[in-house]
Every structure is written in structure tokens, then in C-alpha cells.
Amino acid sequence: TNGERLPFVLVEVPEDAPVFQHSAKRAPFPMQPKVDGVVNWADFLVEDHKNQRDVAKALHDAFGWNMAKPIRVPGNGEYITMLNNTGEAANRHKLGGMLPKNMLLPKLAEEGTGPGALSVPFLSCHSREELEVKAGMAVKHGGEMLVPIMQADGDVCIIRDPCGGVVGLYHRTDDWDTTKPTTVVVPPADYDTVEAMDFHAAQN
């Protein structure tokens, strides 16, 4: 600042240090949901549901992310869970979901506002009560609730701030080391041909 150079210190961190556990291959680590404001999920919203698997291919080619077997939602396309590059399917390896914009945020789709594709980050709340307080504060200051609080491996909602920014609030309660029977990693060669699971069957 003020024309002065600030010192930069490079610190070597052992691989077994807690900070390493937060890397792309190991995150999120168990304490993460207790830290408010940490991004603990993201939904990638596409304009056309016919392009979803092409987007999954692009994410795999660019970042090595894997696609879980899609879940078919009648009339709306598919819900696709994206996983990191470990090839494993436990909850700790989930990075986010992909779905059509009109499935998650029909109001935005109807308004025609925002970009055709949209990424919604979800910020961690350590309890449902904290989530309710933060959502209430956003509404109090001129924002609005786009998706009311619902259950999805915890408590989650989506709000729009007074400037139009869209963000989710998420109190995740899923166990990091559990693998859901419905979370099955799809080989990249099968992205186009794999059959989606039925939505109602996936809920059981």
C-alpha cells in the first residue's frame, strides 16, 4: 500500500496438514458445514436441458470432474450430480448439481433475466435456525426468496439480493463418508448413452 512492497512468504505445507484436506480431491472435510459462508455446493443451470450431458463432458475434459448417473425429472430434463476427479462417489466427493434453469428457478426463466447459463453458489450455514435468520435478513433488506426452505440432504433455500445476485444458503447434514445407492459414477464413454434413473425411484 502507498507504493510500498508487501513481503510475500512461501510456506511449505505437509500433505497431512488440515489445509491439504480441503484440496479438490479431499474437500469438503467434516468441519466445513460448521463454518458460515463457506461455499459447500453449487448448481449449474443450463438454458436447454438437451445440452446437459454436453456440459458434463466439457467439465470432465476441463477439470476431470465425473458425472453421476442422471435422475430423470418428468417434463423438465435431468438432475446430474457432478463429482471430483477421484472416481469415487461418497458424499465428500460431490461438487454440485446440474439442471435446467426452469426446473430450479422458474421465475428467472420466465423473466428472461440473467445469462442463459447460470451458476448458483450455496453458502454454508451451521444450523437451520442460522439459515432462516440469514434468509430473513436478505428479504428485510430488499431481497426475495426464490426457493423456499426445503429438505435436500439438509436445509436449503435460494435468495436473490437487492442487486439481483442469486445465491443459495445450505445447512448440509449428509455424512461425508456415506455413498448413496443412487450416486453411481458414469464412465465418460457412456455419457451419451447411459439411461437416467426414474425420479421417484431415486427418492426411495
Image (tube, rainbow, N blue to C red):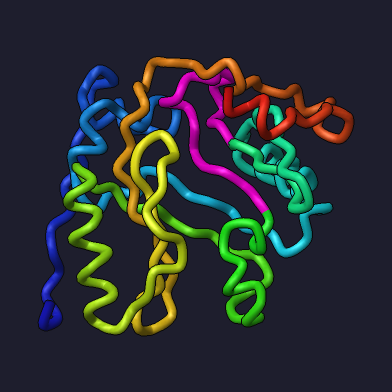
Q: Residue furthest right?
A: 193
User: From the viewer's perspective, is residue 44 above or below residue 62?
Assistant: below
Image-quadrant location for residue 19: top left
Asked if 158 appears above or below 114 in the picture, the reply is above
Residue 110: image quadrant is bottom right
Q: From the viewer's perspective, is 95 left or right of 99?
A: left
Rendered location of residue 196, percent (x, y): 78, 31
Q: How many numbered dots are placed on residues in this image?
A: 0
Q: Which x, y percent locates residue 83?
A: 56, 31
Identify which residue is drawn at 25% across, 17% down: 16
Residue at x-position 64% and y-position 31%: 66
Residues drawn in magenta: 82-99
Picture quarter with the C terminus:
top right
Q: Position of residue 68 (x, y in %)?
A: 65, 29
Position of residue 64 relative to residue 186, above or below, is below
- Left or right: 167, with 36 as reference point: right
Q: Quadrant of residue 200?
A: top right
Q: Is residue 93 magenta?
A: yes
Horizontal arrangement in the rendering, residue 72 relative to residue 27 (left or right): right
- Give me the residue at 23% from left, 57% from top: 132
Q: Is residue 35 left or right of residue 144?
A: left
Residue placed at 58% from the left, 28% from the top? 203
Which is more toward the observer, 154 or 88? 154
Question: Which quadrant of the figure contains the N terminus?
Answer: bottom left
Q: Is residue 183 magenta?
A: no
